[in-house]
Amino acid sequence: VSAGLPGIALGGIFFILSALAAPLVELVRTAQGQSSVARWLHLGRQFALAVAIIAAIDVTLRLVYVSVSAIGLSEQSPGGALAFALVPSGMSAGLLATLLAGAKGMQLWARARAEHPPPLRIRARLASRQKA
Amino acid sequence: MTTKLKDRLTVIVPAYNEAATLADTLRSLQRQTLPPAEIVVVDDCSTDETAAIAESFGVTVLRPPVNTGSKAGAQTFALDRVRTDLVMALDADTTLAPDAIELLLAAFDDPEVAAASGLVLPRRVSTVWERGRYVEYMLAFSFFKRIQDHYGKPLISSGCFSIYRTAELCAIGGWSSRTMAEDMDLTWTLYAADRKVRFLPQAACFPVEPHNLDFLGKQLRRWSHGFIQNVRLHWRSVLHLGYLRSVVAVAFWDALLASLAYLVLIPVLTVAVDPLVLLAYLVDAPVVLVPVVWQAFGRRETGRALASLPSFFVLRLVNGLFFLRAVCRELILRRPLLEYEKGH
């Protein structure tokens, strides 16, 4: 996601989904009069890039599946290549959704705590525990 | 319009023993299509010819009474004497494309924009570490960062080349030394103050990246610790910044999990289950290859990009090692990195 930080697994999916969702977001902005031709051109480039990445992942997974089947590690079955591609993609998407929901949950928890601080009695108990 | 803009900008170049690279940096500044009103080099008590080189270019040279201890300290030292409404930070080992300043200033047509940064690409692409970083930058700046900008939340306004509104910067006390990644700290502080940050890929800069493992280690230590320190420092405000919250959550998760997978899980499974598990190191190659080749093709650097690709997979193993080490020290042992180590 950022230079110097390893890993692009969930980040890759997250930004591909962001690029695919960008036209919808831009439609809303256009309706509000906050868009421009330059913004549409920019997002068009990112959208095309996301589609190209998905195509490349699909080809790679099919190649891996064929190779794995060819050397006898797995039996080839009808629709097997599709399942081979969908299972890890689905698991990653599920993990990403859980992660983002967790982050959103933390935000709601933080907001609730700010709006409704715990009763004085509990705060006093927490403070004494911290002192100890 | 452009003449007005020119009079609005001061450039601060923090420099500690930068005699080898400073001349190129100042030359690129003076050859801009829109030169700044003033260039200030902060000679942070260098022991080499840094000050003499800066003076030979006729720029303003400031020297703090003692070494400030960090890039952030040196930059903030010069902030007091900035009289223009925009200020630019430029690393002493970074050159600019001739039109970089002119292009980046366009971001400030929007009065809500407080900071803007441009495309970063290594100036030298020779060693395995420089090649790995070249691919990292091509990937990050051609795909990830452009989308972040589209959603209005670039993760960082890069410290090596960014322009800020001086008043906004002064209001938050300049660049802070409280973390090892002052650029990330500043960007997230601006978001918390409800200000906009932009990324303009057409404005390009070219830093010298670490050419050996020694320099790379110093840089990765700063970046890994800096990221964790900023997450700890800003997590409450980041939680309320929708898209940034998601980007940070995904970045932290990926960095942690990928480090464990690259350095522990894959080697163990390779030995215990099947050598073919080694393919897992390359399974995300398409996600890297497509944006990098796309960007490289536009720059007529396809050959260089393809030749550099293997280095990326080596570099990210090293990234993982330093990130895990930073997690252990910052979050488990509670021994934060406090000393700024220069290393490009």
Image (cartoon, coloured by chain):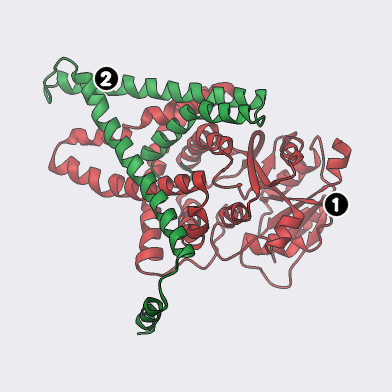
Chain colours: A green, B red
- Amino acid, disc 2: Leu
Q: Position of residue B110 (x, y in %)?
A: 73, 40
Q: Position of residue B250 (x, y in %)?
A: 41, 45
Pointer 1 indicates a residue of which chain? B
The tag on residue B253 is none
Q: Is residue B46 left or right of residue B60?
A: left
Q: Is residue B162 visible?
A: yes
Q: Is residue B60 above or below residue B131?
A: below
Tell me whether the residue at label 2 lies in contact with that at label 1, contact meaning CB atoms closer than 8 angstroms. Answer: no
Q: Is residue B287 left or right of residue B274?
A: right
In the image shown, does A78 or B119 lie closer to the viewer? A78
- Amino acid, disc 1: Gly
Q: Position of residue B129 (x, y in %)?
A: 47, 42
Q: Is residue A24 left or right of residue B191?
A: left
Judge the density around disc 1: few (<14), some (14-19), many (≥20) Cα neighbours within 10 Å: few
Q: Is residue B225 visible?
A: no
Q: Position of residue B285 (x, y in %)?
A: 37, 30
Q: Which residue is mark 2?
A: A63
Pointer 2 indicates a residue of which chain? A
Q: Quadrant of the C terminus of chain A?
A: bottom left
Q: Which residue is mark 1?
A: B58
In the image shown, does B167 or A118 lie closer to the viewer? A118
Residue B275, quarter of picture: top left
- Give the residue at x 21% y 23%: A83
